[in-house]
Image: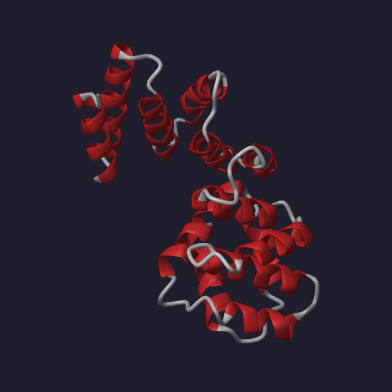
């Protein structure tokens, strides 16, 4: 049964009431210390509130469970990215179900870019091009990887598949993640090699705003 506090925490998190979310998830865990949804909700709320040490404590509890689900690896990997540890995030995500978990796959592509592992990102992106929901993320990672290896024409053609207006939220999400990881300058350097392209221009602007 879903506890009232778990529902309150989820609702508070959705309206960005992080203090309320944290308090509700903590009450839920007092009642049921083994509740994974409460642990993941608390982890996310603490991280969004900038309480990274407290979030790290919850992350260790999540990873210490006997069975760790794909979503749990993704949640902790997102925290590692925010802590400026994209390499650790990438390692965690190899334990997730990258072929079925869209959140894990999209984050994995991003942390590979942050790590400068462009050849790996290119290979992973190719695998995602036939997955409709993952395709925009795959195209973005592929385009950035092609820019990094000097294939500007192919990169621009690839990035054209990620319409800057239609996927504005995706670009904002990537900008926030890359900025949090501390690798914004590296990605901006890659983007500087792009010929005029609306997607590259939009991502560059959002990265500069995020930093």
Applied colour scheme: secondary structure
Q: Where residue 11 appears, x then y in whole percent?
A: 23, 39
Q: Residue at x 37, y 35 (%)?
A: 45
Taking 201 as reference, is 17 left or right?
left
Closest to the observer: 149 or 52?
149
Give 203 or 2, whichever is nearer the viewer.
Answer: 2
Give left or right: position of 48 versus 68: left
The residue at the point 27 percent across, 36 percent down is 10
* Residue 73 picture quarter: top right
The answer to whether residue 179 is visible is: no
* Image spot of residue 146 (x, y percent): 73, 73
Q: Exactly how many numbered labels are in the figure? A: 0
Q: Which is more toward the observer, 176 or 37?
A: 37
> Which quarter shows the N terminus?
top left
Residue at horizontal 27%, vertical 24%?
23
Task: Please say if 1 is above or below 177.
Answer: above
Residue appearing at x 70%, y 42% in the figure: 87
Q: Position of residue 7 (x, y in %)?
A: 23, 32
Q: Is residue 117 above or below residue 144?
A: above
Q: Please provide percent x and percent y for residue 26.
A: 32, 20
**Vertical placement of residue 39 versus 123, above or below:** above
Left or right of 8, for residue 61: right
Q: Which one is nearer the viewer's eye here, 198 or 118?
A: 118
């Amino acid at each position: 049964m879903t506890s009232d506090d778990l529902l309150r925490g989820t609702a508070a998190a959705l309206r960005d009431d992080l203090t309320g979310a944290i308090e509700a998830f903590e009450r839920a865990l007092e009642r049921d210390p083994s509740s994974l949804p409460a642990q993941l909700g608390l982890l996310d709320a603490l991280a969004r509130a900038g309480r990274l040490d407290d979030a790290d404590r919850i992350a260790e509890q999540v990873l210490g469970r006997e069975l760790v689900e794909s979503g749990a690896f993704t949640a902790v990997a997102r925290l590692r990215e925010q802590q400026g540890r994209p390499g650790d995030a990438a390692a965690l995500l190899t334990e997730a179900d990258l072929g079925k978990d869209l959140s894990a796959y999209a984050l994995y592509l991003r942390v590979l870019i942050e790590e400068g592992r462009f050849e790996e990102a290119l290979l992973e992106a190719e695998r995602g091009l036939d997955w409709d929901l993952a395709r925009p993320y795959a195209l973005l990672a592929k385009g950035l990887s092609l820019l990094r290896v000097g294939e500007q024409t192919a990169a621009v053609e690839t990035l054209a598949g990620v319409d800057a207006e239609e996927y504005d939220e995706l670009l904002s999400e990537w900008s926030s993640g890359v900025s949090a990881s501390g690798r914004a300058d590296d990605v901006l350097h890659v983007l500087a090699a792009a010929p005029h392209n609306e997607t590259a221009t939009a991502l560059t602007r959002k990265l500069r705003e995020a930093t």
